[in-house]
Image (cartoon, helix red, strand yellow):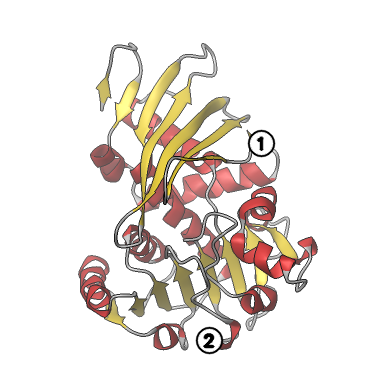
């Protein structure tokens, strides 16, 4: 933690974010943020994207948490790396609700990585079957690692299966995850990874679908995480149709949810196919899973409400001061 020439501005770097914001801390923080977003205690605008080159985007995500008075924004660059993965770099900036002065600047890359997986874990806890114990990860990047660790906090996992475009990378990643989580992990094809899996996380940079309805068994819960814009879709339209579709935020998914928008454009669904927001499910205002054989789908885009809640928690933990 550091201070700079702006006086009381606290700067929380990547290493400190990692050491302080554990999944045990982050999951309830994000859970409450999503409830607040759904019940109107958060005011936020649609994300703004500014292209800054091929495969490069600057995004601005502002919000105000009316319950606490915390307000601010995440400013982030999303750059596609040579291996096809996306790197998120930037800052989360918080302002003092009493004075309007900036008080906290936190590393957005680490906050994003942790809060995204924490949100999926909260959704998994609400939507996956209680006995779920086999996790399939489609992807081998930072979010795949984060999701394995976060979801192991809400379900007792027996096995983790990993698919990646590089079989060698998938095998190495599986060994790494097994070491970190203490859970058996193995590399597999998409079909083998998903077959009989209770929980599936798509955490890729895929532009076109890597998963179809025919590959998914009844009762599976799916976190669709990697696609973050209207031009991307990790799961096929037939799977969107087959699933009980829960979103992190309705307005954003109707504008930026690539999987939903493709199925809608094809005339397969209408807006009413969205069964609810995850905040509504977590608050008990909407049903999540309605039957053991439901295919539940959580569509994650990520929101400033999550970032601000995580950064506010970090500020309080680092300084002991309320915000």
Above or below for 76 versus 315: below
Residue 12 is situated, as x and y percent measured from the top left of the image, at: 30, 31
In the rendered structure, find residue 215 and report the number of the disc placed on it: 2
Residue 35 visible within the image = yes
Mark 2 nearby-residue class (10 Å; few <14, some 14–19, many ≥20): some
Report which quarter residue 273 is drawn in. bottom right
In the rendered structure, find residue 41 and report the number of the disc placed on it: 1
- Tell me what residue is drawn at x 23 percent, y 65 percent: 180
- Side of 51 relative to 24 (left or right): right
- Whichever of labels 1 and 2 marks the residue nearer the N terminus, that label is 1
Residue 84 is situated, as x and y percent measured from the top left of the image, at: 35, 62
Disc 2, SS:
helix
Residue 267 is situated, as x and y percent measured from the top left of the image, at: 77, 71
Above or below for 239 versus 100: below
Whether the residues at callouts 1 and 2 have beta carbons within 8 Å, the answer is: no
Name the one closer to the observer, 321 or 229.
229
Mark 1 nearby-residue class (10 Å; few <14, some 14–19, many ≥20): some
In the rendered structure, find residue 70 and report the number of the disc placed on it: none
């Amino acid at each position: 933690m550091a201070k700079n020439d702006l006086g009381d501005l606290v700067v929380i770097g990547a290493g400190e974010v990692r050491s302080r914001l554990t999944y045990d801390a982050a999951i309830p923080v994000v859970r409450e943020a999503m409830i607040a977003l759904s019940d109107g205690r958060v005011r936020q605008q649609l994300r703004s994207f500014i292209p800054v080159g091929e495969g490069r985007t600057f995004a601005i995500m502002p919000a105000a948490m009316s319950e606490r008075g915390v307000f601010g924004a995440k400013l982030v660059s999303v750059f596609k790396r040579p291996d096809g993965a996306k790197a998120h770099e930037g800052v989360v900036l918080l302002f003092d609700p009493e004075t309007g002065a900036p008080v906290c600047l936190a590393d957005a890359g680490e906050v994003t990585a942790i809060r995204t997986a924490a949100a999926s874990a909260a959704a998994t806890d609400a939507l996956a079957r209680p006995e779920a114990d086999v996790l399939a990860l489609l992807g081998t990047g930072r979010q795949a690692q984060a999701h394995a660790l976060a979801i192991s906090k809400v379900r007792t996992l027996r096995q983790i299966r990993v698919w990646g475009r590089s079989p060698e990378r998938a095998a190495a990643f599986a060994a790494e995850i097994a070491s970190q989580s203490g859970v058996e992990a193995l590399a597999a094809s998409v079909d083998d990874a998903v077959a009989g899996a209770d929980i599936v996380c798509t955490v890729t940079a895929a532009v076109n679908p890597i998963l179809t309805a025919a590959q998914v068994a009844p009762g599976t819960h799916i976190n669709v995480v990697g696609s973050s814009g209207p031009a991307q879709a990790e799961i096929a339209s037939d799977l969107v149709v087959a699933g009980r579709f829960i979103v992190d935020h309705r307005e954003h998914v109707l504008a930026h949810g690539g999987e939903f928008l493709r199925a809608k454009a094809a005339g397969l669904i209408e807006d009413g196919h969205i069964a609810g927001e995850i905040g509504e499910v977590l608050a008990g205002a909407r049903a999540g899973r309605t039957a053991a054989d439901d295919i539940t789908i959580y569509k994650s885009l990520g929101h400033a409400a999550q970032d601000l809640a995580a950064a506010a928690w970090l500020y309080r933990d680092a300084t002991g001061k309320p915000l």
